[in-house]
Amino acid sequence: MKNSKIYPAPFGNKKLSKFCLFSERCGIYLLLILIILGGLILSFFYVEAITIEKQVTISAEVPSPPSPPTGAGGGAAPPPAVTKVVLQGKAYPLISVTVLQDGKVATVTNADSQANFKVEITKITPGVWTFGVWAEDKKGVKSIIFSFTTNIISGMITTISGIFLPPTIELDKTFVQKGEILNILGQTAPQSEVSIIVNSPEEIIKKTKAEADGTWFYGFDTTPLEEGSHGTRANATSLEGLSSTFSQTLTFKVGKEMPGVIIKTDINGDKKVNLVDFSILLYNWGIPKNPAVDLNNDGKVNLRDFSIMLYWWTG
């Protein structure tokens, strides 16, 4: 105590001054140390949850330490802390689910008959990672990649739960006459409610229910649609209340009957009008080597033929 410097107590209390052996600076350091220690203690018991989209949550918690081996002495070293990521959610029944880590395949797992999947990634270092999840339905149609970025903390188990892949979607045709039925179909989790959105001056929403195997179907009456291009997409709500993001958007055209035109613009006969047909059209530009590429039958291939092809474009 000989070298201790005495500082006046706060609030002018001289009786307490002899107990104040720390300078103001030391007091601040002590306060900071207490805050840091408190934060470290809380980090071992606090579970962080961040909501992504509607239902998906990311949580991190410290795993329970394993019991020491029987007969272990008091000086036995504790096992190393586990750093692990768990992903779980719904896809489609009995299919393979691919998990990406920073764009590379981390692992592949299988969904059960109710479309549930769960996978663990143990070989991972702490830091910020971007994960992606996708699957193919039973017809081989690929889902949109569901991706998210999160911080993986050393010595903690990070769980991403409530994942629900968007439904797959297909159209039975890409051109319909006004009033014709357009069949929209795909796959999701069993018994989910599927909402189909059709883009129009006024958005049209239709609902249907998936079957026990996750397949869904809706026959859409195109009578309310104007002539021209339209798009459609879908999302789903599972029996548990999970809501998926939207599927990809597919386009189709509504028009009057023009026999043979759509077939003629499909130059290579693959039931699509896309870059392959455009390449053939460019190759025959001017005086056509193949008369079938002259879409308006005027003896030459030019911008008029290109305009016709664009109108019937399906992609």
Image (cartoon, grey):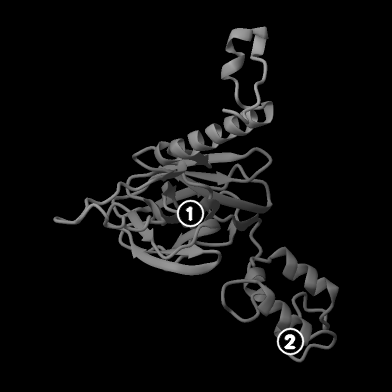
- The quadrant in which the C terminus is found is bottom right
Q: Answer with mark 2 or mark 1, whichever residue precedes in sequence.
A: 1
Disc on res. 291: 2
Check the image and report above or below for 184 versus 282. Answer: above
| Residue depicted at x 36% and y 50% | 189
What SS does tag 1 mark? strand
User: Given this view, does label 2 or label 1 mark the residue nearer the observer?
Assistant: 1
Residue 241 vs residue 28: left or right? left
Q: At numbered mark 2, what does the secondary structure look like: helix, strand or loop?
A: helix
Q: In this view, does 115 lie above or below 275?
A: above
Task: Tell me if residue 194 can be seen.
Answer: no
Q: x, y (%) of residue 268?
A: 62, 81
Closer-to-camera residue (147/227): 147
The residues bearing labels 2 and 1 have C-alpha atoms spaced at a distance of 36 Å
Marker count (numbered) = 2
Q: Is residue 41 left or right of residue 282?
A: left
Q: Position of residue 135 (x, y in %)?
A: 43, 62
- Give how far across and how far down residue 140 sits, in percent: 42, 68
> In the image, what residue occupies the spot 49% across and 62% down?
125
- Residue on which the image places disc 1: 184
180 relative position to 301: left or right: left
* Residue farthest toward the left in the current orientation of the protein: 71
Quadrant location of residue 60? Answer: top left
Q: Disc 2 residue type? A: Pro
Residue 132 location, x and y as percent? 51, 59
Q: How dense is the environment of label 2, judged by Cα within 10 Å: few (below 14), some, or many (20 and up)?
A: few
